[in-house]
Image (cartoon, grey):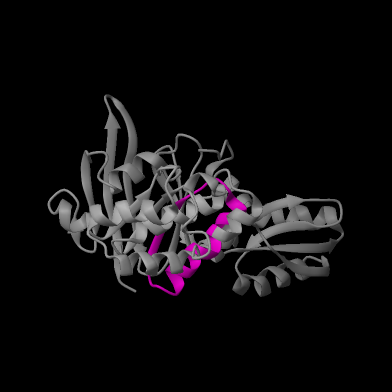
Protein backbone atom coordinates (compact mmCIF):
# COMPACT_ATOMS: atom_id res chain seq x y z
CA UNK A 1 0.00 0.00 0.00
CA UNK A 2 1.28 3.46 -0.86
CA UNK A 3 1.75 6.29 1.63
CA UNK A 4 -1.08 8.83 1.38
CA UNK A 5 -0.40 11.09 4.37
CA UNK A 6 3.03 11.55 5.97
CA UNK A 7 3.97 13.72 8.95
CA UNK A 8 7.70 14.07 9.66
CA UNK A 9 9.05 15.63 12.87
CA UNK A 10 6.24 18.17 13.11
CA UNK A 11 6.41 20.85 15.81
CA UNK A 12 3.87 23.51 16.78
CA UNK A 13 3.79 26.03 19.61
CA UNK A 14 1.58 28.95 20.60
CA UNK A 15 3.86 31.59 22.02
CA UNK A 16 6.22 29.94 24.48
CA UNK A 17 3.91 26.94 24.99
CA UNK A 18 4.77 23.84 22.98
CA UNK A 19 1.70 22.01 21.68
CA UNK A 20 3.07 19.44 19.20
CA UNK A 21 6.55 17.99 19.54
CA UNK A 22 8.29 15.77 16.99
CA UNK A 23 5.13 14.12 15.64
CA UNK A 24 5.75 11.60 12.85
CA UNK A 25 3.20 9.21 11.39
CA UNK A 26 2.17 7.61 8.09
CA UNK A 27 -1.31 6.78 6.81
CA UNK A 28 -1.46 4.09 4.13
CA UNK A 29 -3.84 3.77 1.21
CA UNK A 30 -7.11 2.05 2.11
CA UNK A 31 -6.74 2.04 5.90
CA UNK A 32 -8.76 3.50 8.74
CA UNK A 33 -6.21 5.30 10.92
CA UNK A 34 -7.35 6.13 14.46
CA UNK A 35 -5.93 9.15 16.31
CA UNK A 36 -6.39 8.84 20.08
CA UNK A 37 -5.37 11.02 22.98
CA UNK A 38 -6.60 12.61 26.21
CA UNK A 39 -8.15 16.06 26.28
CA UNK A 40 -5.52 18.62 25.28
CA UNK A 41 -3.18 15.99 23.82
CA UNK A 42 -2.81 17.86 20.51
CA UNK A 43 -5.24 15.95 18.29
CA UNK A 44 -7.22 18.91 16.96
CA UNK A 45 -4.08 21.02 16.49
CA UNK A 46 -2.54 18.22 14.42
CA UNK A 47 -5.69 17.85 12.32
CA UNK A 48 -5.81 21.60 11.65
CA UNK A 49 -2.19 21.53 10.47
CA UNK A 50 -2.92 18.60 8.15
CA UNK A 51 -5.85 20.51 6.65
CA UNK A 52 -3.77 23.67 6.23
CA UNK A 53 -5.79 25.60 8.83
CA UNK A 54 -2.74 26.13 11.06
CA UNK A 55 0.86 26.76 10.06
CA UNK A 56 3.68 24.35 10.96
CA UNK A 57 6.59 25.65 13.02
CA UNK A 58 8.95 22.98 11.69
CA UNK A 59 8.81 19.57 10.06
CA UNK A 60 6.89 18.43 7.01
CA UNK A 61 3.39 17.25 6.12
CA UNK A 62 2.80 15.74 2.68
CA UNK A 63 -0.22 14.30 0.91
CA UNK A 64 0.56 11.88 -1.91
CA UNK A 65 4.07 13.33 -1.97
CA UNK A 66 2.92 16.95 -2.13
CA UNK A 67 4.31 19.08 0.70
CA UNK A 68 1.42 21.17 2.05
CA UNK A 69 3.65 24.24 2.42
CA UNK A 70 5.44 24.03 -0.93
CA UNK A 71 2.58 22.58 -3.03
CA UNK A 72 -0.51 23.53 -1.05
CA UNK A 73 -3.07 23.41 -3.87
CA UNK A 74 -1.80 20.08 -5.20
CA UNK A 75 -1.90 18.59 -1.71
CA UNK A 76 -5.38 19.88 -0.88
CA UNK A 77 -6.83 18.38 -4.08
CA UNK A 78 -6.48 14.95 -2.51
CA UNK A 79 -7.89 15.65 0.96
CA UNK A 80 -11.20 16.48 2.59
CA UNK A 81 -12.19 16.98 6.18
CA UNK A 82 -15.06 17.28 8.62
CA UNK A 83 -13.72 18.96 11.74
CA UNK A 84 -17.09 19.54 13.39
CA UNK A 85 -20.66 18.44 12.69
CA UNK A 86 -21.67 19.09 9.06
CA UNK A 87 -23.06 22.63 8.69
CA UNK A 88 -25.59 22.85 5.86
CA UNK A 89 -28.74 24.73 4.94
CA UNK A 90 -31.56 23.23 7.00
CA UNK A 91 -34.35 24.47 4.72
CA UNK A 92 -32.80 22.87 1.63
CA UNK A 93 -32.86 19.20 0.71
CA UNK A 94 -29.81 17.04 1.10
CA UNK A 95 -29.50 16.95 -2.67
CA UNK A 96 -29.63 20.75 -3.03
CA UNK A 97 -26.97 21.15 -0.36
CA UNK A 98 -24.75 18.76 -2.30
CA UNK A 99 -25.52 20.62 -5.52
CA UNK A 100 -24.28 23.90 -4.05
CA UNK A 101 -21.03 22.32 -2.93
CA UNK A 102 -20.64 20.46 -6.24
CA UNK A 103 -20.79 23.74 -8.15
CA UNK A 104 -18.11 25.19 -5.89
CA UNK A 105 -15.70 22.26 -6.34
CA UNK A 106 -16.52 21.47 -9.98
CA UNK A 107 -18.23 18.11 -9.39
CA UNK A 108 -20.88 16.86 -11.80
CA UNK A 109 -24.45 15.78 -11.09
CA UNK A 110 -23.35 12.27 -11.93
CA UNK A 111 -20.79 12.50 -9.13
CA UNK A 112 -23.55 13.64 -6.74
CA UNK A 113 -25.52 10.52 -7.60
CA UNK A 114 -22.41 8.38 -7.02
CA UNK A 115 -21.68 9.74 -3.54
CA UNK A 116 -25.35 9.55 -2.53
CA UNK A 117 -25.24 5.88 -3.47
CA UNK A 118 -21.97 5.39 -1.58
CA UNK A 119 -23.36 6.75 1.69
CA UNK A 120 -26.76 5.06 1.27
CA UNK A 121 -28.88 8.20 1.21
CA UNK A 122 -30.92 7.48 -1.93
CA UNK A 123 -34.29 7.25 -0.17
CA UNK A 124 -33.98 10.49 1.81
CA UNK A 125 -31.76 12.70 -0.34
CA UNK A 126 -34.70 14.91 -1.45
CA UNK A 127 -35.85 15.53 2.14
CA UNK A 128 -34.88 18.73 3.95
CA UNK A 129 -31.60 18.63 5.82
CA UNK A 130 -33.26 19.77 9.08
CA UNK A 131 -35.41 16.62 9.07
CA UNK A 132 -32.40 14.28 9.18
CA UNK A 133 -31.20 12.42 12.24
CA UNK A 134 -27.66 13.13 13.46
CA UNK A 135 -26.45 9.94 11.79
CA UNK A 136 -28.00 10.95 8.46
CA UNK A 137 -26.49 14.45 8.74
CA UNK A 138 -23.10 12.88 9.31
CA UNK A 139 -23.54 10.62 6.29
CA UNK A 140 -24.51 13.61 4.15
CA UNK A 141 -21.42 15.40 5.44
CA UNK A 142 -19.33 12.47 4.29
CA UNK A 143 -21.08 12.59 0.91
CA UNK A 144 -20.17 16.27 0.60
CA UNK A 145 -16.56 15.52 1.51
CA UNK A 146 -16.45 12.82 -1.18
CA UNK A 147 -17.63 15.02 -4.04
CA UNK A 148 -14.17 15.95 -5.32
CA UNK A 149 -13.02 12.31 -5.02
CA UNK A 150 -10.31 12.75 -2.35
CA UNK A 151 -7.71 10.13 -1.52
CA UNK A 152 -7.91 10.78 2.23
CA UNK A 153 -10.65 12.02 4.52
CA UNK A 154 -9.99 13.61 7.92
CA UNK A 155 -12.77 13.23 10.49
CA UNK A 156 -12.72 14.77 13.97
CA UNK A 157 -15.10 12.93 16.33
CA UNK A 158 -17.45 11.69 13.55
CA UNK A 159 -19.62 9.66 15.95
CA UNK A 160 -19.95 12.37 18.61
CA UNK A 161 -23.56 12.68 19.76
CA UNK A 162 -24.79 9.69 17.77
CA UNK A 163 -26.91 6.88 19.20
CA UNK A 164 -25.65 3.27 18.85
CA UNK A 165 -27.44 2.80 15.52
CA UNK A 166 -25.94 6.02 14.13
CA UNK A 167 -22.47 5.05 15.34
CA UNK A 168 -22.73 1.70 13.57
CA UNK A 169 -23.90 3.43 10.37
CA UNK A 170 -20.86 5.73 10.36
CA UNK A 171 -18.46 2.92 11.31
CA UNK A 172 -19.70 0.63 8.55
CA UNK A 173 -19.56 3.48 6.02
CA UNK A 174 -15.99 4.44 6.85
CA UNK A 175 -14.76 0.85 6.74
CA UNK A 176 -16.53 0.38 3.40
CA UNK A 177 -14.91 3.50 1.94
CA UNK A 178 -11.47 2.36 3.10
CA UNK A 179 -11.58 -1.35 2.39
CA UNK A 180 -13.76 -1.34 -0.75
CA UNK A 181 -13.09 2.05 -2.32
CA UNK A 182 -9.42 2.30 -1.32
CA UNK A 183 -9.79 5.64 0.47
CA UNK A 184 -7.67 6.45 3.52
CA UNK A 185 -9.61 7.54 6.60
CA UNK A 186 -7.94 9.52 9.40
CA UNK A 187 -10.33 9.61 12.35
CA UNK A 188 -10.11 11.18 15.79
CA UNK A 189 -12.46 9.90 18.48
CA UNK A 190 -12.72 9.42 22.23
CA UNK A 191 -14.99 6.35 21.96
CA UNK A 192 -12.30 3.70 22.40
CA UNK A 193 -14.52 0.66 21.98
CA UNK A 194 -15.76 2.08 18.70
CA UNK A 195 -12.23 2.83 17.51
CA UNK A 196 -11.24 -0.75 18.27
CA UNK A 197 -13.98 -1.98 15.94
CA UNK A 198 -13.43 0.67 13.27
CA UNK A 199 -9.69 1.15 12.86
CA UNK A 200 -6.88 -0.80 11.24
CA UNK A 201 -4.08 1.28 12.78
CA UNK A 202 -4.14 3.39 15.93
CA UNK A 203 -1.86 6.24 16.99
CA UNK A 204 -1.86 7.33 20.64
CA UNK A 205 -0.76 10.90 21.38
CA UNK A 206 -0.36 12.59 24.76
CA UNK A 207 1.07 16.00 25.68
CA UNK A 208 1.82 16.62 22.01
CA UNK A 209 4.00 13.53 21.59
CA UNK A 210 3.33 10.20 19.89
CA UNK A 211 3.45 7.42 22.47
CA UNK A 212 2.59 4.41 20.33
CA UNK A 213 1.54 3.53 16.78
CA UNK A 214 0.44 0.05 15.80
CA UNK A 215 -2.33 -2.15 14.54
CA UNK A 216 -5.31 -2.66 16.83
CA UNK A 217 -4.14 -6.24 17.32
CA UNK A 218 -0.65 -5.13 18.35
CA UNK A 219 -1.95 -2.52 20.79
CA UNK A 220 -4.45 -4.86 22.42
CA UNK A 221 -1.69 -7.42 22.89
CA UNK A 222 0.63 -4.97 24.63
CA UNK A 223 2.82 -4.14 21.66
CA UNK A 224 3.69 -7.73 20.80
CA UNK A 225 3.33 -9.27 24.27
CA UNK A 226 0.09 -11.04 25.09
CA UNK A 227 -1.71 -11.09 28.41
CA UNK A 228 -1.80 -14.60 29.89
CA UNK A 229 -3.60 -15.80 33.02
CA UNK A 230 -1.81 -18.39 35.16
CA UNK A 231 -3.46 -20.50 37.87
CA UNK A 232 -0.57 -21.67 40.02
CA UNK A 233 0.11 -23.55 43.27
CA UNK A 234 1.42 -22.65 45.74
CA UNK A 235 0.34 -19.14 44.72
CA UNK A 236 2.50 -17.17 47.17
CA UNK A 237 5.65 -18.97 46.06
CA UNK A 238 4.70 -18.56 42.40
CA UNK A 239 4.10 -14.81 42.72
CA UNK A 240 7.38 -14.35 44.58
CA UNK A 241 9.21 -16.20 41.79
CA UNK A 242 7.55 -14.08 39.09
CA UNK A 243 8.30 -10.86 40.95
CA UNK A 244 11.93 -11.91 41.21
CA UNK A 245 12.30 -12.83 37.53
CA UNK A 246 9.84 -10.68 35.54
CA UNK A 247 8.53 -7.90 37.83
CA UNK A 248 7.83 -5.57 34.89
CA UNK A 249 5.65 -8.20 33.19
CA UNK A 250 3.14 -8.77 36.02
CA UNK A 251 -0.17 -7.12 35.12
CA UNK A 252 -2.32 -8.23 38.06
CA UNK A 253 -2.22 -10.56 41.06
CA UNK A 254 -5.36 -12.17 42.53
CA UNK A 255 -6.02 -14.88 45.07
CA UNK A 256 -6.71 -17.49 42.39
CA UNK A 257 -4.59 -16.34 39.46
CA UNK A 258 -1.86 -13.99 38.22
CA UNK A 259 -1.82 -12.14 34.86
CA UNK A 260 1.50 -11.64 33.09
CA UNK A 261 2.50 -10.06 29.77
CA UNK A 262 4.77 -12.32 27.73
CA UNK A 263 5.26 -13.19 24.11
CA UNK A 264 3.97 -16.56 22.97
CA UNK A 265 7.48 -17.83 22.26
CA UNK A 266 8.49 -17.01 25.86
CA UNK A 267 5.86 -19.24 27.45
CA UNK A 268 7.88 -22.48 27.29
CA UNK A 269 10.83 -20.88 29.10
CA UNK A 270 8.60 -19.33 31.76
CA UNK A 271 6.67 -22.58 32.30
CA UNK A 272 9.88 -24.54 32.67
CA UNK A 273 11.23 -22.04 35.19
CA UNK A 274 8.07 -22.31 37.26
CA UNK A 275 8.09 -26.10 37.30
CA UNK A 276 11.81 -26.25 38.11
CA UNK A 277 10.98 -24.25 41.23
CA UNK A 278 8.22 -26.68 42.28
CA UNK A 279 5.36 -24.48 41.12
CA UNK A 280 2.44 -26.41 39.59
CA UNK A 281 0.57 -24.89 36.64
CA UNK A 282 -3.15 -25.71 36.97
CA UNK A 283 -4.32 -23.40 34.21
CA UNK A 284 -2.98 -21.13 31.47
CA UNK A 285 -5.11 -19.07 29.09
CA UNK A 286 -4.79 -15.98 26.92
CA UNK A 287 -6.69 -12.91 28.14
CA UNK A 288 -8.17 -10.53 25.61
CA UNK A 289 -7.17 -6.91 26.27
CA UNK A 290 -9.35 -4.01 25.15
CA UNK A 291 -8.01 -0.94 23.38
CA UNK A 292 -9.25 1.09 26.34
CA UNK A 293 -7.08 -0.92 28.75
CA UNK A 294 -4.04 -0.47 26.51
CA UNK A 295 -4.79 3.23 26.13
CA UNK A 296 -4.97 3.73 29.89
CA UNK A 297 -1.70 1.84 30.40
CA UNK A 298 0.15 3.76 27.67
CA UNK A 299 -1.07 7.22 28.70
CA UNK A 300 -1.07 6.56 32.41
CA UNK A 301 -4.82 7.15 32.62
CA UNK A 302 -6.53 10.51 32.48
CA UNK A 303 -9.48 12.05 30.74
CA UNK A 304 -9.94 10.65 27.25
CA UNK A 305 -12.66 13.03 26.14
CA UNK A 306 -11.67 15.64 23.56
Q: Residue furthest top?
A: 16
Q: Residue, x 40% and y 57% (percent of image)?
A: 95
Q: Residue, x 29% and y 44% (percent of image)?
A: 49
Q: Is residue 71 above or below residue 284?
A: above
Residue 58, position in %: x, y? 21, 42
| Residue 41 appears in view | yes
- Res. 257 image quadrant: bottom right
Residue 239, position in %: x, y? 77, 54
In the image, 11 versus 82, the foreground residue is 82
In the image, 153 versus 1, the foreground residue is 153
Q: Residue, x 44% and y 75% (percent of image)?
A: 180
Left or right: residue 30 versus residue 63 is: right
Could you tell me which quadrant the N terminus lies in? bottom left
| Residue 248 appears in view | no
In the image, 55 versus 224, the foreground residue is 55
Q: Which residues are magenta?
A: 170-195
Residue 48, position in %: x, y? 32, 42
Q: Is residue 180 above or below residue 146?
A: below
Q: Residue furthest left?
A: 70
Left or right: residue 30 versus residue 164 is: left
| Count of marks overlaid on the render | 0
Q: Is residue 277 magenta?
A: no
In the image, 45 versus 257, the foreground residue is 45
- Res. 41 image quadrant: top left
Q: Is residue 180 magenta?
A: yes
Residue 76, position in %: x, y? 23, 54
Amino acid sequence: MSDVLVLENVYKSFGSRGIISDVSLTVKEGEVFGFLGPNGAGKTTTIKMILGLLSIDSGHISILGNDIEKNFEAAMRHISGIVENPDMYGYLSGYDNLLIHARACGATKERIDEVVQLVGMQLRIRDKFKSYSLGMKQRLGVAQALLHNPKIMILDEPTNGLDPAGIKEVRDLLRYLAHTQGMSIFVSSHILQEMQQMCDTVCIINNGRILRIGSVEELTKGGGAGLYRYRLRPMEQAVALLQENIPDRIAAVHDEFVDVRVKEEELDTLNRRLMENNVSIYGLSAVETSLEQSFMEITGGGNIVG
